[in-house]
Image: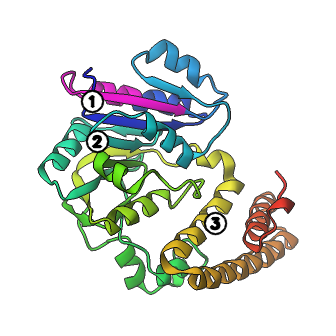
Amino acid sequence: MNAIPTLSIIIVSWNVRDYLRACLNSIQQTVPTDFAYEVIVVDSASSDSTLEMLHTEFGWVQVLAQDRNIGFTKGNNVGLKAAKGRYLMLLNPDTEVFDQTLVQMTRCLDQHPEVGIVGPHTLNTDGSHQSTRRRFPTMGTAFFESTWLQPYAPRRILDHYYARELPDDAVFPVDWVQGSALMVRREVYEQIGPLDEGYVMYYEELDWCKRASQAGWKALYLGTFKITHHGGKSSEQVFDSRVIHFQQSKLRYFGKFHGWLAAAGLRLFLIEMYVQEIILQSVKWLIGSKRRLRVKLLRSDWKALLALAGFPGMIKG
């Protein structure tokens, strides 16, 4: 490979050895041998023989082994700092790329100098469409999206946020694309800096795309080039923590870009939401409805409530 590769692919991995193997194989099988690229795997102290697999099967991959789980955001920043490519790709370990997708994404950036970020058409494991393109969220989005009010949201709010009126297999500008498969110009990274490590997971790519947009860069959804994303295989190992991180990240984002007053109102709303959810799950437990599930949900809701209320020290494992 050339000293300065066209593309650096950064993969943050934690206990997903078999998915990571499939991901790396798909890259090796679909990227032409004359295309200059590097793959950097940042492993967050996996305990499932990931490092042994990388050593024996993928000697061409640069491995940055960490001594603890440093999280998705910091892990990507470790990889970004080590990357040498003109283009930088954040890619989840539970993805598989289709033929020519990565090469075509770089060519799109070559052809559109005003575009700083691109994301591909993402499919679920069963081949159905996975929504990964978005418009920037409004305060209306904050109160409806991923809360108990979502089923009651005015359709126009979430349709606008998810860009549902746009075809899945077309190319068009968007505000941001999800970090499961996101390619960025080095110039963007050098101008706006790394991911904000105040987000442990969730919202970090939204924040990045927002800063890129504020700096004058455009984002593009490439519906003609595809990947498969099996979805959440690392985060599902920490069910309770991911709920806490999602809500804390939401508050951080809206505090940064909409002001402290908006974030304070959102925090109060989320606290009330979790109180109501705890009451509801407790009633269902009392009447004997799926008690094992209720215990799991109650534990998660209590941890989220304590974190939102400012009592993280009371959260037990």
Q: Can residue 149 be seen in this view?
A: no
Element at label 1: loop
Residue 175 quadrant: bottom left
User: Which residue corresponds to mark 3?
Assistant: 248
Distance (Cα) linking label 3 and label 2 = 30 Å
Q: Is residue 57 visible?
A: yes
Is 254 magenta? The answer is: no
Element at label 3: helix
Tell me if residue 41 comes above or below residue 53 in the rendering.
Answer: below
Sequence order check, earlier mark of 3 and 2: 2
Q: In this view, does 214 lie to the left or right of 309?
A: left
Sequence order check, earlier mark of 3 and 1: 1
Is 30 magenta? The answer is: yes
Across and down, in percent, residue 290 comes to 77, 62
Tell me if residue 42 comes above or below residue 71 in the rendering.
Answer: above
Which quadrant, please, contains the N terminus? Answer: top left
Across and down, in percent, residue 107 comes to 16, 43
Across and down, in percent, residue 21 comes to 46, 27
In the drawing, what numbered circle is on residue 5? 1
Q: Residue furthest left?
A: 111
Identify the colour scheme used: rainbow
Residue displayed at 25% across by 59% down: 220
User: Which residue corresponds to mark 2?
Assistant: 87
| Tag 1: amino acid | Pro
Distance (Cα) linking label 3 and label 1 = 37 Å
Residue displayed at 68% across by 35% down: 68
- Span of residues in magenta: 24-42
Sequence order check, earlier mark of 1 and 2: 1
Tell me if residue 206 comes above or below residue 224 in the rendering.
Answer: below
